[in-house]
Image (cartoon, grey):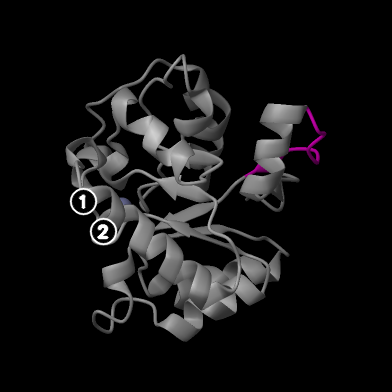
Amino acid sequence: MLADSGYHTILPDELYDYLTKGRALPAKPIMLTFDDTDGDQYEIARPELMKYGFNAVYFIVFTNIAKNKHYMYRQQIKQLSDEGNVIACHTQDHGNFKKLKGADWETQIDVPKKKLEILTGKPVKYFAFPFGLWNSQGLPELHRRGFLAAFQLTDMRDPNDAIMTIRRLIDCGYWTTATLDYNIKHDFGKPANKKQPELAAR
Ligand SMILES: [Zn+2]
């Protein structure tokens, strides 16, 4: 549906340049993101996206790597990176960003960021909040650690730091293509709705 409708996938650097420098995006831009290191993102999503020349962002929970057969292996993540996709940080073990304090910043964010940079050979510049949860007080910690932007779910953006609270839309996996199409066109204009069941389930 996305390909038939003329969408072009973009990556976070392109979105960042658009948001901060006004650089032009392709027609009908869309960014596809996958969280949590699930193996089916490599086994199922990757070949499907490749059919259409689409790229995506993979937000990795570090301790999920090779945790069991349902998660991606290191070499699969490296391959996704080598193929032009973006590998980004989703914490060490899906820790709640709102509860991070003291040494947690290092263990939940610095350590997995560095390890992913070693694995991919590329800087890790983007972050996604586990469960979509964030608070304003923590956002300077992301700037301090060199992140250019961060991605939440569907809460309102922080008016003082919109680049660190970019909204996303979750396709729960049971939507029809028509529902996805409708929500892409209509959801981002709506106020935040914290009661969406698929959000509670993440
Ligand atoms: Zn997650």
The residue at which mark 2 appears reads as 107
Q: Name the foreground residue: 173 vs 78.
A: 78
* Numbered badge on residue 16: none
Horizontal side of 112 relative to 32 (left or right) equals left
Q: Residue at x 55, y 71 (%)?
A: 46
Q: Residue at x 21, y 50 (%)?
A: 104
Horizontal side of 121 relative to 33 (left or right) equals right
Question: Regarding mark 1 in the picture, which secondary structure is present there?
Answer: loop
Name the amino acid, label 2: Thr
Residue 28 falls inside the magenta stretch: yes
Local crowd size for mark 1, using a 10 Å CA cut-off: few (<14), some (14–19), many (≥20): few
First to last magenta residue range: 22-30
Q: Are marks 2 and 1 in contact (CB under 8 Å)?
A: yes
**Mark 2 close to ligand 1, CB under 8 Å:** no
* Rendering quarter of residue 185: top right
- Is 94 located above or below residue 166 in the figure? below
* Numbered badge on residue 103: 1
